[in-house]
Image: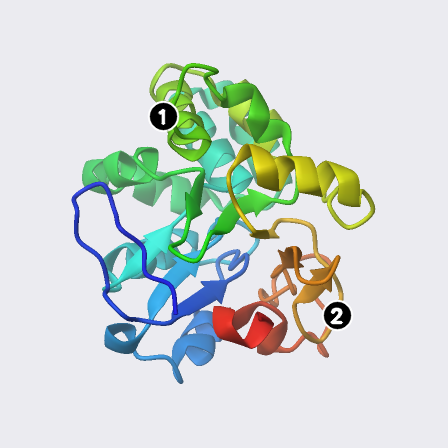
Amino acid sequence: MAAFLDRAGTAPENLPVLLVGDVHGDLERLFEALGPYPADRWHTVFVGDLVDYGMFGVGALRYARDRPNTTVLLGNHEVAMLWALRDASRVGFWMSIGGQEHDLDELARDASLQAWLRERDAMVRLADATLVQHCGHDGYSQWIDNNASDAVDSINARARDLLMHEGEPELWDVLSAKNVFEQQPERLQRWLQATNSRRVVFGHTPHGGRRPAVYHEGKAINVDGLLSKFHAKHRRIAPIGASVTPLEALT
């Protein structure tokens, strides 16, 4: 079992970890997925991209924010939404990737949700040295300060700074990168060494399987199983278990 110690110093002690892939505004399937996993018994980790495609992106954000013992990471779609909120010229692009205008209006009226979203980390390293991040790529490495004692802390600090200071273009580029870990084990191994991790879990690039995709003897795990029925690539046979799974089931 792995527990996460947040910056406030509190942790869901002794709770098993539940991984949740890209939700993309599908609250109905999210509620169904989390039904067997009571919040008080699980440390739930969302890999990002709770918004867009589906009609309830802001609802998904609020649900994840308010769910006890939960960690929510930043995805490229959250970045695009915040970018559109700050810069009206980006609204068209954001809507072209599934953004819902009513969600943007609702976010604009909710300053506390905006503040919470801007404080999300780009990644988390769990107590068992599992790294969780949005995309299966090592582009995050450009945010590592060579003088930092911990690469993950350095990456998160830089990502938050970019989000606070109109750095959405750089964030978008890094968080939108496709999965390279599936085909490049040497690159994966270098990334694990750089972040002091033993394996990495991510979403973003749909894997198309009936269970999370596991690569290179479990060193990389993809949990984007197209959970949202509103996603352009969603298939009726895409089971919930392809996106939502206990971490222990992957060991």
Residue 125 or residue 226, whichever sits in front: 125
Amino acid tagged 2: Gly
Residue 47 or residue 4, whichever sits in front: 4
On the question of residue 246 being in view, the answer is no
Residue 108 or residue 132, whichever sits in front: 132
How crowded is the residue under tag 2: few (<14 C-alpha within 10 Å), some, or many (20+)? some
Q: How is the image coloured?
A: rainbow
Are discs 2 and 1 less than 8 Å apart at CB? no
Callout 2 secondary element: loop
Residue 178: horizontal and vertical position, in percent? Answer: 72, 40
Measuring 50% from the left and 48% from the top, which residue is drawn there? 131
Q: Quadrant of residue 193?
A: top right
Left-right relation of 145 to 174: left
Q: Earlier in the sequence, mark 2 or mark 1?
A: 1
Amino acid tagged 1: Ala
Question: Disc 1 designates what residue?
Answer: 157
Image quadrant where one finds the N terminus: bottom left
Measuring 39% from the left and 24% from the top, which residue is drawn there? 163
Q: Quadrant of residue 164?
A: top left
Measuring 17% from the left and 53% from the top, which residue is drawn there? 10
Question: Disc 2 designates what residue?
Answer: 209
Callout 1 secondary element: helix
Asked if 106 appears above or below 13 in the picture, the reply is above
Asked if 70 appears above or below 1 in the picture, the reply is above
On the question of residue 204 being in view, the answer is yes
Measuring 76% from the left and 65% from the top, which residue is drawn there? 208
Image quadrant where one finds the C terminus: bottom right
Q: Quadrant of residue 218?
A: bottom right
Residue 172: horizontal and vertical position, in percent? Answer: 57, 28
Left-right relation of 196 to 138: left
Left-right relation of 245 to 162: right
Q: How many marks?
A: 2
